[in-house]
Image: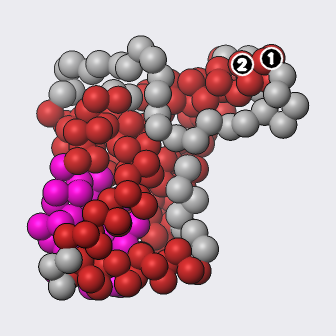
Amino acid sequence: MARTDSEIIDRLVSRAQAGDRAAFSQLVRLTMNDVVALTYRMTGDRDAARDLAQDTFISAWEKIDGFRGEARFENWLYRIASNKALNHLAGEKSHRTESLDGDTTAEPAASPDGSPDVMLQREQLREGVLAFMQTLPPQQRAVFDLRFYRQLSFDEIAKVTGKAVGTVKTHYREAVAKLRLFAIEKGWAS
C-alpha cells in the first residue's frame, strides 16, 4: 500500500473514531475486497466469506475506539476477520461447503499476451492453490494466507493471529512443505 494510501486510511480511522460513519464507510470500501478474499480463502465458501466480512466490519465499527494504531488498520481488520473465519471453521468441523463457481473476489491475474491457454493455466493454478488451502488446518491456513497473499512479515502475522513468531514461522514452514507435496501430486513440480 502506498504511503499516501496509509495516510488516507489513518485520517479516515481518526474520523471514524470520532464517530464519523461516512469515514468508516470509506474505510469499508477501501478494504472490503481484501477482507472478503481473506475470509474466502480461509473458508472456501463465498457466501460465508461475505457474511464473515460483514461481521468483521460490524465488529470493527463497534471496537474502533479500541484501535490504538500499534499496527496498520488493515492488519487489525485481518485479525478480526481471521478470528471470525477460525470460529466459523471450528463451528462447522464436520460440515464444509465449497463454492462451485470459485469466485474469490480477488483480482484475476491478467494474461500479458491475452492467450486463452495462459489464462486457463493461471485459473487452474489459482483454483489448485485454493483447493490446497482447504486441506490445511485452520491456523496454518490463516498464516499461509497472510504471508502468501497479504505478504505480511512474520512479526505482523504474529500480532494478527495472537501467536508467537516462532509458532507462526512453524505454521508457515509446514504449510509450504505441504504445498510442495501438493504441487508434486498435481504435477506442478517434480
Q: Does residue 49 appear left or right of residue 55 in this picture? A: right
Whether residue 169 is visible, yes or no, is: yes
Residue 113 drawn above or below residue 67: above
Q: Which residue is mark 2?
A: 120
Question: Residue 170: where, in percent of width, then height?
Answer: 49, 54
* Viewer-side residue, 158 vs 69: 69
Magenta extent: 55-81
Q: Quadrant of residue 27?
A: bottom left
Coloration mode: secondary structure
Q: Quadrant of the C terminus?
A: top right
> Mark 1 and mark 2 in contact (Cβ < 8 Å)?
yes
* Viewer-side residue, 11 vs 85: 11
Of the residues shown, which amino acid type is indicated by label 1? Asp
Residue 128 drawn above or below residue 142: above
**Mark 2 falls on what kind of element?**
helix
Q: Quadrant of the N terminus?
A: bottom right
Q: Which residue is mark 1?
A: 117
* Viewer-side residue, 66 vs 3: 3
Say which residue appears at 37% left-offset and 44% top-offset.
36
Q: Main secondary structure of the magenta part?
A: helix
Say which residue appears at 16% left-offset and 57% top-offset.
58
Please count the marks in the image: 2
Question: Residue 129: where, in percent of width, then height?
Answer: 57, 30
Asked if residue 20 lies in the magenta stretch, the reply is no
Of the residues shown, which amino acid type is indicated by label 2? Leu
**Mark 1 falls on what kind of element?**
helix
Question: Residue 49: where, in percent of width, then height?
Answer: 31, 37
